[in-house]
Amino acid sequence: MNRSINDLMDNKWWQEFAVVAFSFTIYTLKNDWMFISSIGSITLGVLFYVILYVHAQFNRFFFLPILFKKHKPLIYIFLTIIGIIIFSVLLNNLMTLDMFSQSQLYQNSHQKSFTFQFASVSGTLVCILSPIIVFKFYRIYKQQTDKTILYNQMQLNALRAQLNPHFLFNTFNTLYGISLQFPERTSDLIMKVSQLMRYQLESNNEHSVSLEDELSFINSYVQLEKERVAHRCEITYKCEIDNENAYKISPMLLIAFIENAFKHGTCAIEKCFVHINISVSKGLLHLNVINSVPKETKVISTNIGLKNTTERLKLIYGEDYTLNVNNDPTTYNVDLKIQLKMGKNEGS
């Protein structure tokens, strides 16, 4: 039951319907519609309400942004008053038309005055804009709450990843195998593993990290995977950034797509590959990951990491990203574009 109510509260169309129902009810009560028995009078009343509603929506989409986005209250008040006067004059002139003389609507003398129309336009504007603003701030508050909950969940997932037995087993198994065949590589590989662990620990409490740190982590992870499977798989990693130090990004955001590529793209014995390309130009980050898809695989995946990453993208970047995933019988292609911001913490 509560979930259904929350779904209705989150649905913009239901919110619009509620605003119309509320304002129309106030409008009919104000004008004593219960005494109207003529269809023509009801039609004219609806026409008047539509004009009032159009005025309120005009104010909403053209004037309110001046108040909320440009923070210019005096200009908003001035334009709102001008709009109220224009629509009041329009309604007052409509009252002089012959079709109103035979209707049961607005028959009192004071209802035909400019003052009454001015009050009607102003009152209806308040009745319509008030719930719209309330719903707007409700959505903003809920988005911030969801963002906080997701951040807390990220921390929990990061703590679990630090002690992931499967990850530790594969890492130390790789270290052991290479140390037997190529002991001279062991020290470098241990350094890469330490970088991975250190990054996970240090980024736990951060909403954002520098792009340079994120890419350094990815590079260490890719080099580790190369040591493990490069002898039987084709692995390429290209990175072109115009200015690494200029950008911030949410930590551990890109690694889920890369880790998924190695998990599924290298499980075959022959003809497997993983191609990773990362570029940033003028703040636009472009990640493209392509991996082979084996004909038969025993890898079991719940896709939780990918689902969580997709939700994080929605909450943190909103409309400033695009994600396209193409899955065919032979290849799996992830193409992600994010508009990064310079000199500002992402996700804060």
Image (cartoon, rainbow, N blue to C red):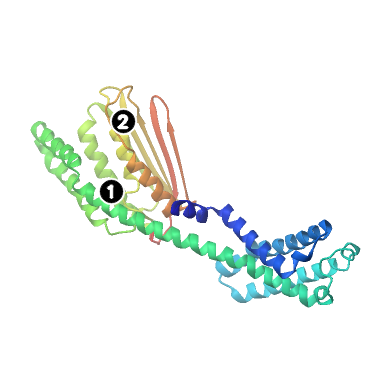
Residue 268, percent from left and from top: 27, 25
Figure quadrant of residue 48: bottom right
Disc 1 residue crowd, few under 14, some 14–19, many 20+, Cα 10 Å: some
Q: Quadrant of the image for the C terminus?
A: bottom left
Disc 1 designates what residue? 216
Q: x, y percentage for residue 114?
A: 80, 75
The image quadrant that residue 247 belongs to is bottom left
Q: In the rendered view, does 142 fall on the left or right side of 192?
A: right
Q: Secondary structure at mark 1?
A: helix
Residue 254: image location, x then y, percent: 35, 45
Looking at marks 2 and 1 on the same chain, the residue that comes earlier in the sequence is marked by 1
The residue at the point 70 percent across, 68 percent down is: 29
Between 229 and 61, the one lying in front of the other is 61
For the question of whether residue 214 can be seen, the reply is yes
The residue identified by callout 2 is 265
Total number of numbered labels? 2
Q: Disc 1 marks which amino acid?
A: Ser
Q: Is residue 331 above or below residue 147?
A: above
SS at mark 2 in the image:
helix
